Image (cartoon, helix red, strand yellow):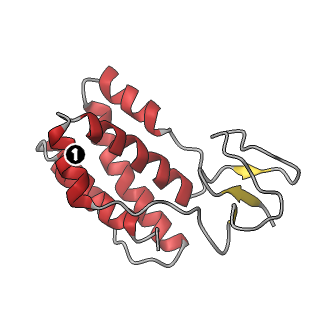
Amino acid sequence: MSKFCSNCGNELGTDTNFCSKCGAKINNDFGNNYASLNNDYPRIPERNIVTCVILSILTCGIYGIYWFICMTDEANAINHEDGVTGGMAFLFTILTCGIYGIYWAYRMGQKINEAGKLHNKPTGDNAILYLVLSIFGLGLVNYCLMQNDLNRFSK
């Protein structure tokens, strides 16, 4: 059975001390630092949505960037995929003047839905909703809805 990093979901070798993707220290006693592809998923933190929104507003969007990156990486981790990292998604969004951000919102809806099916968590397919909200400039609403779905995987 394959083992995965509990921090980022990267597949690991049997005698690895550090994850090759995120650098997290690996406990080789195969305890809580591993998640099996079939039975479990990496632990992701549960975020308070109201706190995230307030911090995003108070920091003039800087916390929103951090939130964007974290949600992207967590969606990749719970799907056990090496998709575009949060930092790369943010860079692509800047380079394309926001166009990639619209695609990102749609893709996040798909990823969260796939993770829900993979781990038997009720999430629903909100990809079109995220796309429409993103087109109308309601990215913060998207973040809240995505975080609500991601919080289901933290329990």
- Res 129 seen here: no
Between 23 and 140, the one lying in front of the other is: 23
Q: Locate residue 76 relative to residue 22 in the image: left or right.
A: left
Disc count in the image? 1
From the viewer's side, name the closer residue of 149 and 130.
149
Q: Which residue is mark 1?
A: 55
Rendered location of residue 66, percent (x, y):
35, 39
- Looking at the image, residue 145 sits to the left or right of residue 9; the answer is left
Q: Is residue 154 above or below residue 68?
A: below
Question: At which x and y percent is residue 56?
Answer: 21, 43
Residue 94: where, in percent of width, then height? 31, 24
Q: Please determine whether, in this image, residue 75 is positioned above or below residue 1.
A: above
Q: Is residue 69 above or below residue 132?
A: above
Outermost residue toward the top in this view: 95
Quarter of the N terminus within the rendering: bottom right
Residue 27: x percent and y percent?
77, 56
Q: Quadrant of residue 59?
A: top left
Give the residue displayed 75% in from the left and 43% down from the top: 18
Residue shown at 34%/43% (left/top)?
A: 68
Secondary structure under the numbered disc 1 in the rendered image: helix
How crowded is the residue under tag 1: few (<14 C-alpha within 10 Å), some, or many (20+)?
A: some
| Residue 1 in view here | yes
